[in-house]
Image (cartoon, grey):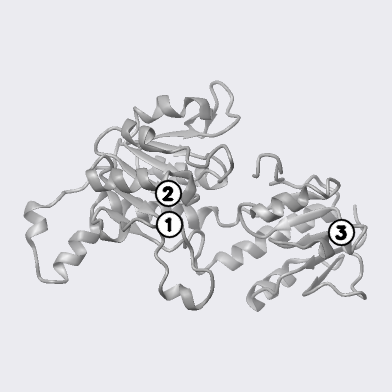
Amino acid sequence: MISQLHVHILENQDPLFLGLLHRQLNNCIQLTTGKIHQDLPHYQMLVAGRPDPAALSHSPALQWLVIPFAGVPVETQGLMQNYPTISVHNLHHNARPTAELALALLFAAAKNLLPYDQALRKSDWTPRYEGNPGLLLHGCPVCIFGFGAVGKEVGRLCSALDMEVTGVRAGAQPGEIWKGIPVLPTALLQKQLVKTQILILTVPLTENTRGLIAKEELCMLRKPSVLINISRGQVVEEEALYEALFDGTLSAAGLDVWYAYPSDRPSRRSTQPSRYPFFKLPNVVLSPHRGGASDQTEVLRAEALAHLIHAASKGEELWNRVDLDRGY
């Protein structure tokens, strides 16, 4: 039990988030925010996605770094290798909003919604009589690659639709089952793909997963096949994905993650998300990396961080610890 836990939030946060967090913390928690300065008291927990050495070295009492989102920035992963006594933890408050977006992309892609919408806006009804009627999801075999917090939530929603769900994750044990869903190790991914019509990617980007889904893997999927990517763009080989959608190897895709992002505010209106013209393909649903965004995301973030802080104040072992060698 820590009599007085000091938590410092490095980045400027939304006032709504800070207000929600303050209301949930008990009196033994001291909370400060903003840049590091000489007079700042020593803190045991630092909340920051991209801390600098000054923030990590200011307090000799620092035990925990909490990244206030899912995933670990590459620069943070490398930096924290130099601080082995500080444990790194994620927040997975975004699991449900991200899973809901995955389902939205799945429905839009599998049911061919966008071409129908665009045609009817021009008073054109012909797709109703001549177009792709869409894929029946009931009973459809789904593989969720990356069966962590988000993947499990996606799996729960797909199971509720009576889809045939299988999870794949690194380190899965033989015979592993989660709430009725079989979970396989990554070594069996290709074997599972030949049984799969819908591939949903929720896996973190690491050196092991970068480019892991390439032409060979896309060709393995049962036809008609749909890919949903809410993980990171680079998990799927860029050219192979475009070609598979262009030539019909993939029937459709819903993509929330990309290969190029705006570098500054002015470029937000002029940055193509890929060197390939995905925007010209009628069988792709494009989403600008909305991920876990929702009207309740900051509420969920505050709740998740408050629970983690209270656990630390009670001397409990903290969850969502990041393995810096693996990158998640």
The disc at residue 256 is 1
Sequence-wise, the earlier of marks 3 and 2 is 3
Tell me the kind of residue under disc 3.
Gln
Spot occupied by residue 79 in the image (x, y as percentages of width and height)? 76, 53
The image quadrant that residue 60 belongs to is bottom right
Residue nearest the observer in this picture, 147 or 76: 76
Q: Residue at x 75, y 69 (%)?
A: 10
Disc 2 versus disc 1: distance between alpha carbons? 6 Å
Instruction: Identify the element where label 3 is drawn.
Output: loop
Tell me the mark number nearer the camera, choosing from 3 and 2.
Answer: 2
Instruction: Identify the element where label 2 is drawn.
Output: strand
Residue nearest the observer in this picture, 66 or 93: 66
Disc 1 versus disc 3: distance between alpha carbons? 36 Å
Instruction: Identify the element where label 1 is drawn.
Output: loop
Sequence-wise, the earlier of marks 2 and 1 is 2
Q: Residue furthest front?
A: 275
Tell me the mark number nearer the camera, choosing from 1 and 3.
Answer: 1
Sequence-wise, the earlier of marks 1 and 3 is 3
The disc at residue 44 is 3
Q: Pointer 2: what residue?
A: 229
Q: Are marks 1 and 3 in contact (CB under 8 Å)?
A: no
Disc 3 versus disc 2: distance between alpha carbons? 37 Å
The image quadrant that residue 158 belongs to is top left
Tell me the kind of residue under disc 1.
Asp
Q: Residue at x 60, y 67 (%)?
A: 299
Q: Does residue 39 lie above or below 180 as drawn?
A: below
In the image: residue 28, left or right of residue 154: right
